[in-house]
Amino acid sequence: MRGQCVKQKMKGMLNWKAWMILLLLTAAVFGQPKPVLASAGGVGVYTVQVDGYLALRNAKAYDASNEIGELHTGQQVLHVETRNDSGDYWYVYSLTEQKLGYVNKDYLVYDGMLEDGIYCDVNVDGYLAIRTAKAYDASNEIGKLYTGDTVLVLNDSDPEYWLIYSPDELEAGYVNRNYLVTTGGNTGNVYTDNSVGGISANLRCDMDNMIFSTSAISFLIPDSWAKGITYFYYEDRIEFYCSAVYNAAGMEDGYLCSIFRSTDPNAGYEGTTFMGSFGGYDYYFSRPTDLRANPNDAYNYSVYQEMSGDLDSVRTSLVIGE
């Protein structure tokens, strides 16, 4: 796979795709993001109900030092049940934070089971390690998967290591995506979603042929974006992020650009380019007017700069309404 399409995606994981990745679990809702992470049977969906915020933690303890995120009322999490769940703390995947962590379950309200998830089958000689980090290291192995095992993809925004959940192993972690094939034998390089309307209707992210398209727009995905784009799609716009920055703590947000439609004649604010009209709407290409990556992280910053450098190729290849 050359890159990832992230539905994940909602602030995936494409990501990349790929992931990649910006995940909406419900039907299309106006103004609500549809992420490229998906849902799956057997996993509970819960909504946060709390005064203030609910801390996402890296340990099962009430301690300010272990907070890795803040969840607010109305945000959703997936309960990825593991053997480490306790009476008070559950292990969850936050669709907003795009992170795994522990939360106090008393502030979660059950919404139903996850549906329409992205499942992958394992195909490997020997075993595929589930890891706590995106690195090949014997010390970070927490589980083993074998050929024929099926996993739920939580975040596919990294070009090499995907975040998955194994209901059989009761473990969530990173695996090398080169040993995963989507259920039914597809490679997983193409992501499609027809469940949302507007600019995002008939969305297709094809990382094999490097084409991103909907019923209203299409453009050629530049080679640099195969390093990982995360995108979020809505009724009126699609937003693209550099996954290397978006998924890194303290790295700003990695925003690259957005393509949006409007009937407002004043929609062409600073940083936007009018691209044409179609179906009663004007379409615009918008890029950031400020820096969205931290220069102190040399590698991720360089990836962001490279991907930002290809924004003109995205804009010039953008086709409206054909």
Image: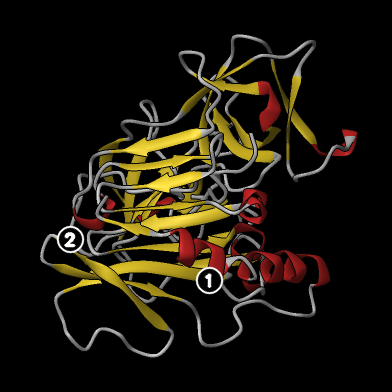
Query: Looking at the figure, which quarter contains the N terminus?
Result: top right
Q: Which mark is residue 255?
A: 1
- Residue drawn at point x = 49 percent, y = 37 percent: 80
Q: What residue type is labelled 1?
A: Tyr
Q: In which quarter of the image is residue 143?
A: top right
Q: In which quarter of the image is residue 159?
A: top right
Q: In this view, does 309 lie above or below 6?
A: below
Mark 1: give few (<14), some (14-19) or many (20+) Cα within 10 Å.
many
Q: Which mark is residue 103?
A: none
Q: Distance between the residues labelled 2 and 1?
A: 22 Å
Residue that extends furthest to the left in the rendered view of this protein:
280
Q: Where is mark 2, residue-wise? A: 30
- The percent position of residue 87, horizontal first and vertical second, equals 49, 43
Which one is earlier in the sequence, the residue at label 2 or at label 1? 2
Q: How many marks?
A: 2
Q: Which amino acid does label 2 sit on?
A: Phe
- Circle 2 — which element? loop
- Circle 1 — which element? strand
- Residue drawn at point x = 40 percent, y = 39 percent: 38
Q: Along the line of sight, which residue is nearer the eye, 111 or 174?
A: 174
- The percent position of residue 30, horizontal first and vertical second, equals 17, 60
Q: Is residue 121 above or below residue 282?
A: above
- Residue drawn at point x = 78 percent, y = 10 percent: 125
Q: In this view, does 133 lie above or below 70?
A: above
- The percent position of residue 134, horizontal first and vertical second, equals 75, 45
Q: Quadrant of residue 73?
A: bottom left
Instruction: Name the front one of labels 2 and 1.
Output: 1
- Residue drawn at point x = 42 percent, y = 51 percent: 105
Q: Along the line of sight, which residue is nearer the eye, 45 or 206?
A: 206
Name the side, left or right, on which 215 lies relative to 82: left
